Image: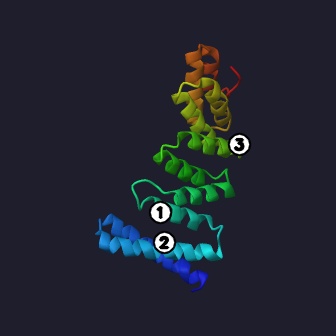
Amino acid sequence: MSEETDRAKAIRLERVYRDALEAEADYDLLDPLRGELEAAYRRILETDPDDADTLTALAVLLSTDVQLPDGESVELLWRVFDMDRADEDSCESLVSLLEALSEEEEADEVYRQASEAGNLQAAFELAARFDERGDLKEAEPLYRRAAEAGNAHAVANLAALLEERGDHEAATALRNGEGARPG
């Protein structure tokens, strides 16, 4: 089969499979559809092994097939993430899967790498994780970076952190739109 045919088949099967899931179809119908869809994804990847959309789709398909995602799903999403660490979608897909596996340290590492690559949402998410754990020393510079880029949630969280630390002047300035200046 040609790549176009495999892509067209994958698109058609995705629709049919999604509809069957929504209709709560029986396993005897879902399993063969899932198998055909997986095979179509794998054929596409044979000719284009770095197709991020197909890698992600296959990882999602594999991870929803079992109670806990398997190693192949994680490996596929790491491949996609490594292609563009600044991409918000690949970062969130990988973190979601790692969290489902209770791999919190690895999820932190994904956010750290994404943040270093310029993903400001990842900087905010990592800051929030540190904040939840009470590690304000790690959270503050990440909140500050995201706040300086205009993330409203980071501004609010940084202002709350500064307020909690007793730096009322810096917190007020931040809330008044005077920037995320050092406090």
Spatial CA distance of label 3 from label 2 is 33 Å
Q: Which residue is mark 1?
A: 62
Location of the N terminus (image quadrant)? bottom right
Above-or-below relation of 93 to 179: below
Q: Which residue is mark 2?
A: 38
Side (left or right) of 49 relative to 14:
right
Residue at 43%, 53% (x, y): give it: 68
Residue at 39%, 71% (x, y): give it: 17
Spatial CA distance of label 3 from label 1 is 29 Å
Look at label 3 and name its amino acid.
Glu
Location of the C terminus (image quadrant)? top right
State which quadrant residue 34 falls in. Answer: bottom left
Asked if residue 163 can be seen in this view, the reply is yes
Look at label 2 and name its amino acid.
Glu
Above-or-below relation of 124 to 58: above
Single out the mark in the foreground, 3 or 2: 2
- Tell me if mark 2 has few (under 14), some (14-19) or many (20+) residues whose alpha carbon lies within 10 angstroms of its own: many
